[in-house]
Image: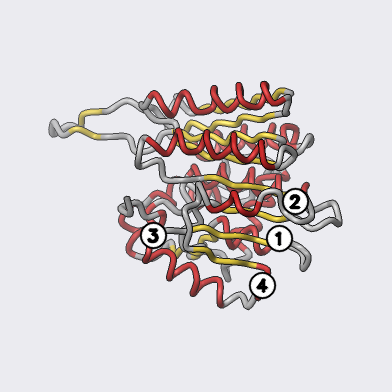
Amino acid sequence: MFSYRHAFHAGNHADVLKHTVLIATLQYLLEKDTALTVLDTHAGVGLYRLDGDYARTSGEAGDGILRMTMRAPGTAGAKVADAFAPALQRYVDMVRSFNTGSSIKVYPGSPFIIQRLLRPQDKLKLFELHPVDLNALAGNIAQLKAGRQVAVLADDGFEGPKKFLPPPARRALLLCDPSYELKSDYARVLEMVQDGLKRFATGTYAVWYPIIARPEAHDLPRRLKTMAQKAGKSWLHATLTVKSSKIMESVDGQTKRPGLPASGMFLINPPHTLKAQLKDAMVQMVELLGQDKHATHTLESGS
């Protein structure tokens, strides 16, 4: 249950998608003065060293945020002619704000990105069960001296948010991004979102998921779409594919697995401006992060 460690994956292409969407969504929701409650169901440790053992072992950031910045406008390896799309620029600026100089050695997870954007009246609830990650998260958050604005909770991210819906000011964003190590996670995501809509129908629900060769992974966005439609809610679905999902064989006959080839974000009650903001950003993600001819994206919405 506790084998997954996001430190191996911090700053990868899935984080680029997830955090670009998260920042765009959160900035829109914060345009209203009324307090916002943000629930992060699987918080991790909050802050990651890209030059640490975990990140160096996987090298995934090299195909994510590091690849993007090396190919940024104005660099020798530029793949985008003029400038980042605004949504992508805000994401890159956010990551750079946690670093000094030109190199990126620290990657902010969702808790630190969210907290950086919050106003004094807003609240952030962080859920984490992994004992090591929980202690690290609590220590990292304590350095922010955010007081009662940020709560670190040793609670099941699928169950814990229930007690906070609806929030006092009746405005909320729930970010759900479990590891999906267990097949049951897919069903639990669906149950949690369904329950959330019953408790607080006007909240914004953002679900990240991996696109892998597993029936549950392909069923998840379809079932979320059906759920939104039955509830009469608007929805948005964005996916980013950076490479083929085929298992290859190396020259020495060894099986070479591709790693995570793609991921998606599905939102219920998204900002009405989000699709337009992501349109150019998704195209640039493919240009900057694509590893082969299979790189592509999708962007759909409905109401």
Q: Quadrant of residue 282?
A: top right
Which residue occupies the foreground of this view, 59 or 24?
24
Quick check: marks 2 and 4 in contact, CB under 8 Å?
no
First-in-chain label (3 vs 4): 3
Mark 3 and mark 4: span between their CA atoms? 22 Å
Quick check: marks 2 and 1 in contact, CB under 8 Å?
yes
Which residue occupies the foreground of this view, 302 or 228?
228
First-in-chain label (2 vs 1): 2
Mark 1 and mark 3: span between their CA atoms? 26 Å
Read off the residue under disc 1.
117
First-in-chain label (2 vs 3): 2
Q: Determine whether the residue tagged by mark 1 lies in a helix, strand or loop.
A: helix
How far across and how far down the image is residue 202, in percent? 75, 39
Read off the residue under disc 4.
148
First-in-chain label (1 vs 4): 1
Mark 1 and mark 4: span between their CA atoms? 16 Å
How far across and how far down the image is residue 168, in percent? 76, 56
Quick check: marks 1 and 4 in contact, CB under 8 Å?
no
